[in-house]
Amino acid sequence: MSCQNMQHQWTKYKDGTLTDAEVEELERHTEECDECMNYLQNLLDEEEIQPVTASSTFDQEKAKRSMIRAKWRQRFTNVLTVLSAFILLWLGGSFLSAIYYSFTPKGEYLRTVDKAAIESALPNIYVQNSRTETKPFFRLQNEYTLYKEIGQEQKSVGQYTFHHLFERVTNVDKNFLNDHYNMKLSFAYPERVKKEKDASFYQKWSNETWGALDQLPEGTVSEIALSFDQAYTMEEIEEKLSSTLSSDISPVWYALDTGYEAKGSDTSNPLVDLTSSFGFPSMLELPFYEEKETFTDEERVVQLLKLLADNERTVQQIRWMNPDELQLTNRYKFVKKNGVKIYGIVLTGPTKELLKLKNEPSITYSSLGEVELWNWFTRPTQGTLH
């Protein structure tokens, strides 16, 4: 049965007494009313339509065309409704994401976490450029360009892209230049050195490093990692270096004693490389906290460990180590209790200047990283085109 509003019109339609104006009204209504369209379909199927008046243009063929148009119009309306709802939902989700990440501290907090996770894991790697993109439905994408310092120049090594849902990292895309990153730097943890049965093991490899520095020409700059006979404070490390090196050479990254370097399933490995080392850059920054607080160098490192412990899932996405061996909370507690102690550093500078550390008695192991042509000078201007 047709809808009640048009019942009288359908009666006149079957009797053939509709005027032209009533025909147009019924046609428009039928295109929009499922009930009337179905009623018309039944009439057509049963061939119950009476001959129309001469003035009427609403004949059977036109009725069929109207019904077809009505069906397509309804389909288009349904598609348009779905698309409109999707667009509104997408815009609403984008607006809510912008509010959530841009107008609250959460966006800055996540960028601080991402940066800390990268720079604490990769010796002499730091984040310089970043790009943030908020996405609908409380998603955030942070893209970071990774650099390392060789001499006085910064060298791009790749990009990390963090994907967040609320405050949870869902994935990290790692894109290194040439699709890989060479692990050339390594450290020797003091306790492992003392337990090594072959006393010449570390000395042998250190001699390789010093020999390479000796063979390199004067006009080069190098990157080396040095390990010490015990963990020292940052001030003690500075004193040792200042007595040998020129004042413009200082550590660019510190290997931090977190109490777990001699533990875990990989204790048979005599070296600590970037798969298991924890440390921090010389220019450690924690933007989320430093807008509100002032830290000493040691307090900033302790806060770094706490930040990592509070965001273990993010650290897991960065690290090449067994998640069970992260022990971030225990590492944080160890550093907070015992203070910031350093067992290794990364230096970069003129090759022959670094060679002066060869006879430093507290150095137990050294490894050679990148070597570049001489760049130990200041340019009036420089930049990069993309």
Image (cartoon, rainbow, N blue to C red):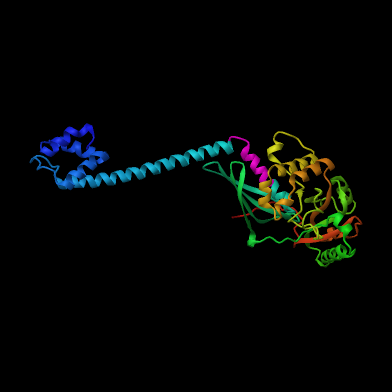
Asked if the stretch drawn in magenta spans residue 113, the answer is: yes
Q: Is residue 373 visible?
A: no
Asked whether 144 or 55 is in front, the reply is 55
Residues shaded magenta: 103-115
User: Which residue occupies the extreme left position in the image?
Assistant: 54
Q: Is residue 70 above or below residue 183?
A: above
From the viewer's perspective, is 20 left or right of 74? left
Residue 266 x, y percent position in the rendering: 77, 58
> How many callouts does the rendering have?
0
From the viewer's perspective, is 119 left or right of 228? left
Residue 53 x, y percent position in the rendering: 8, 40
* Magenta span dominant secondary structure: helix
From the viewer's perspective, is 323 left or right of 368? left
Asked if the stretch drawn in magenta spans residue 13, the answer is: no
- Choose top left, top right, bottom left or bottom right for residue 368: bottom right
Q: Is residue 63 above or below residue 270?
A: above
Q: Which quarter of the rendering shows the C terminus?
A: bottom right
